[in-house]
Amino acid sequence: MKLKLAKVLALAAATSLALAGCSAAGTNNTGGTMLDKLGKSEGTLTLLGWPGYAEDGSNDPAYDWVSQFEKDSGCQVTFKPYGTSDEALSLFKTGEYDAIAASGDATLRLIAGGYVQPLNTDLIPSYAGVYDFLKNRDWNTVDGKTYGVPHGYGANLLMYNTKVVTPAPTSWDVVFDKASAYKGKVTAYDSPIYIADAAVYLMAHKPELGIKDPYALDKDQLAAAVDLLKAQRENVGEYWSDYLKSIQSFETGNSVVGTTWQVIKNSMSAKSNTEAILPTEGATGWSDSWMVSSTTKHVNCAYKWLDYIDSPKANAQATEYFGEAPVTQDACQYASKGFCETYHAGDADYAAKIYYWTTPISKCLDGRTDVKCTDYAAWTKAWQEIKG
Amino acid sequence: MLKNSATAVVPTSGTTARRISSYLYQHAKVRLRLLLAAPVFWLGLVYIAALLMLLITAFWTVDEFTGNTKVVWNVDNIVSLFTDSLYTTVTFRTVGIALAVTVIDVILALPIAFFMSKVAGPKLRNLLAISVLLPLWASYLVKAYAWRSVLSNTGILQWILEPFGVKTPGYSILGAAITLGYMWLPYVILPFYAGLEKVPGNLLEASSDLGANTFTTVRRVIFPIVLPSIIAGSIFAFSLTLGDYITVNIVGGASQMLGNLIYTNVGTANNLPMAAALALIPIGIMFAYLGAVRRTGALNNL
């Protein structure tokens, strides 16, 4: 009987090896070629994006900008929301999606992996109206080719409890060097990309490290950022990635100071006594791009969607619903009053203080060629060690 | 054709069905093999092979550029489980939490199960059984978030403890252990209850007639009989805690458990080989635990 069990196990192992061999044979496609003219609609379109990026009224009848697109273009939209950039990446790799709204910490990985195709922006008329400071940036353009059109952008702000954190802070030092005053009540964003927040702080306070770009850190610079974050860890009450969790812990006073988004600030009740600022050092932020799959069979519908989402009205609806700045000035006339001011839409000075999320890769993004930079895998390992 | 085979089922001598049936009757081994083919196929291919396929990736690596899993045989991941201080720290923390949860649950479940099986009348017993099982109807996430508000600085626990000058444990390892203890309590009470049911009431009376006090009765009569149930319950609490990562994420503050490391390696780091290597730790611990339990002979009584 023993022998038979061994046989069964061996068979199982052999089968699993064979199957695994098939799945490991990776897909290494070349990125596809650029489209030169639009054709007929294919009738369907499958999108992947952050929650709230393509609302068809099924969550709340008041928010619907997809139905209009379906009527205009004749493309039936299926939308799948994702929770983190990393989840987005693994979903998109399946090849089941025609287009994706990705943040800068995913876009370069999508481009390098050959999962998205270069775009012919002449076929996207509303791209002309997009703010210039969002075009041709590290996270959407590689070797002069544009791979993504902007959806919206925002900054990771500093939120604090006005009753507890006095005097009102102007710098990130309240979560780093002076964080011990709020021991156990500091909060931070739970992702390896948060290391860039420490790098932004070091850029201003330790110029001798020579950090030019918070996403281009060599080994020593990463080590300095990690040390700073390990010291911060002593004072952190909890890390957040779910924004509802963040809202709740500021409401109850479990957190009193830490990273936040404008949309979280907007959701806080008046009695929570919270304020959110863009500190003097600047901040990290995101600028999301719509990209088209290199293997899509619905490329015309995808282009039409990219054009539609950058058109003023749809862009105003989508960005206002999510809580981020629109990508075109014309959107402001469709958004509710004060929206563009709250989110500093088009404020180039404000935008210049934002270091947009981008994927750290071993080729330094700041142009240095004499050293190798640390890539996202190294950041992830470092992040696990920081949390301990 | 179809009609023919349908009529063939009728047991007249000489038909195909009849011949098969008599063949199977005479050959017991073939009969057994055919009977077991489907479940063995399921267990072997679908269950064990899938698991092995996952675990075998622990000996592979990830292509740095494309992020795809690459078949390059190596043991780096396994070695780092023992040498990297991150992994050893988190392993010890996870085992510590699992042990704490097990102890909390055993201490809470024993009196409840004893009361249910030996003291309560039939009506009260049913009521208690329902209230023990009722939380299982609610979603795991709902319960975890409920504990998030219970444990918060303005939560009910703080309100209860404040008069005694004690603070809520808040979002911390202790908070996570308490929440997990709550989560798995029904799974511990039920085997205890089933075990205590088996203890005949007259055995307890006989014990006290023969002069044993309550403590001696518990130690010499009840305990040996319910030991297998205690072990069964502890396996639930221990193994379920070992693999958890959601509760600790919601109420654990900044702490990580093994499950979190596996999760970030799959989700964030895209490092399936390392995740598979980490998954070997709880599997190894459970094997050791079951082996130890087996040595005590408790499994024989189940």
Image (cartoon, coloured by chain):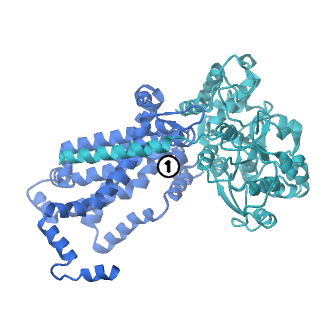
Chain colours: A cyan, B blue
Taking the image as shown, residue B14 lies to the left or right of residue B233, namely left
Furthest residue toward left: B210
Q: Residue at x 25, y 54 (%)?
A: B229
Report which quarter residue A210 is drawn in: top right
Number of numbered callouts drawn: 1
Residue A156 percent coordinates (x, y): 73, 40
Which sits in the foreground, A123 or B199? Answer: A123
Residue A329 seen: yes
> Measured from the top left, where is residue A213 in percent x and y?
74, 27
Would you place residue A81 above or below residue A43 in this image?
A: above
Residue drawn at the location 67% of the way across and 47% of the way down: A250
- Picture quadrant where residue A311 is located: bottom right
Query: How packed is label 1: few (under 14 Cα within 10 Å), some, or many (20 or more)?
Result: many
Q: Nearer the viewer, residue B40 or B103?
A: B40
> Which chain's residue wears label 1?
B
Q: Which residue is mark 1?
A: B247
Residue at 55% of width from left, 42% of height from top? B253
Amino acid on which disc 1 is placed: Thr
Q: Can residue A320 be spotted in the picture?
A: no
> Is the residue A290 above or below the residue A65 in the image?
above
Residue B261 in the image, given as x and y percentages of width and height: 50, 39
A223 left or right of B164? Answer: right
Q: Quadrant of the N terminus of chain B?
A: bottom left
A168 relative to B187 in the view: left or right: right
Q: Secondary structure at mark 1?
A: helix
Q: Position of residue B176 (x, y in %)?
A: 48, 46
Furthest-front residue in this view: B1
Foreground: A175 or A182? A175
